[in-house]
Amino acid sequence: MTNPTATLLISCPDQRGLVAKFANFIYSNGGNIIHADQHTDFAAGLFLTRIEWQLDGFNLPREFIAPAFNAIAQPLGAKWEIRFSDTVPRIAIWVSRQDHCLFDLIWRQRAKEFIAEIALIISNHSNLKVVAEQFNIDFQQIPINKDNKSEQEAQQLEL
């Protein structure tokens, strides 16, 4: 990716000035906001926003963005996360016996409809192991029944 971006996902108690505080953090560090959405859930008193900006020209190195933003977010009671557009997530796909959804996800990933590395396919059956092998993706079969469900789910999450 030639022009990487950063995206903040934020939720916090609704209060005046939130958009300005978040935008000012980006602006004061030399950032250029290219996309922003916000929404207030009045029933829950919750403010939600997604702000994306270009990293080109941003004054803070990536490793300092989170600590710097936390200084703003913490007093607001905000929950937040930051993602960078050029960071490719590793994902696992859970499947059962039918192959059509698995093929669809693999083809979409290969066509770059979504950016991710499919690192693992997990199933409680062996039927789709051949598909994983065809695309050179690790496959783990973890049989589940009512007696071992919690242990097997924990193993899946560990993988």
Image (tube, rainbow, N blue to C red):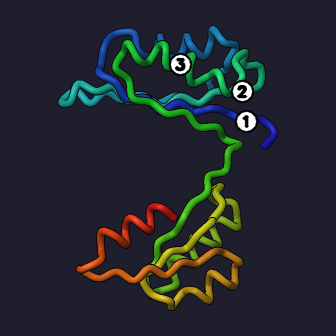
Asked whether disc 1 touches disc 2, contact meaning CB atoms under 8 Å apart, the reply is yes
Question: For this view, does 85 lie left or right of residue 157?
Answer: right
Q: Residue at x 51, y 69 (%)?
A: 93
Front in this rendered view, residue 87 or 158: 158
Front in this rendered view, residue 84 or 152: 152
Q: Position of residue 26 (x, y in %)?
A: 60, 16
Point out the tag, 1 or 3, that comes first from the N-terminus: 1
Q: Give how far apart the Cα atoms at labels 1 and 3 are.
A: 19 Å
Give me the disc on residue 129. none
Element at label 3 = helix
Point out the tag, 3 or 2, that comes first from the N-terminus: 2
Question: For this view, does 129 lie left or right of residue 48?
Answer: right
Q: Amino acid at mark 2?
A: Leu
Asked whether disc 1 touches disc 3, contact meaning CB atoms under 8 Å apart, the reply is no
Element at label 2 = loop
Residue, disc 3: 69
Element at label 1 = loop
Query: In the image, which is nearer the foreground, mark 1 or mark 3?
Result: 3
Q: Is residue 123 above or below residue 20?
A: below
Q: Position of residue 28 (x, y in %)?
A: 63, 8
Residue, disc 1: 4
Question: For this view, does 75 lie left or right of residue 123?
Answer: left
Q: Position of residue 120 (x, y in %)?
A: 58, 69
Query: In the image, which is nearer the foreground, mark 3 or mark 2?
Result: 3
Residue, disc 2: 55
Image quadrant in which you'd find residue 76: top left
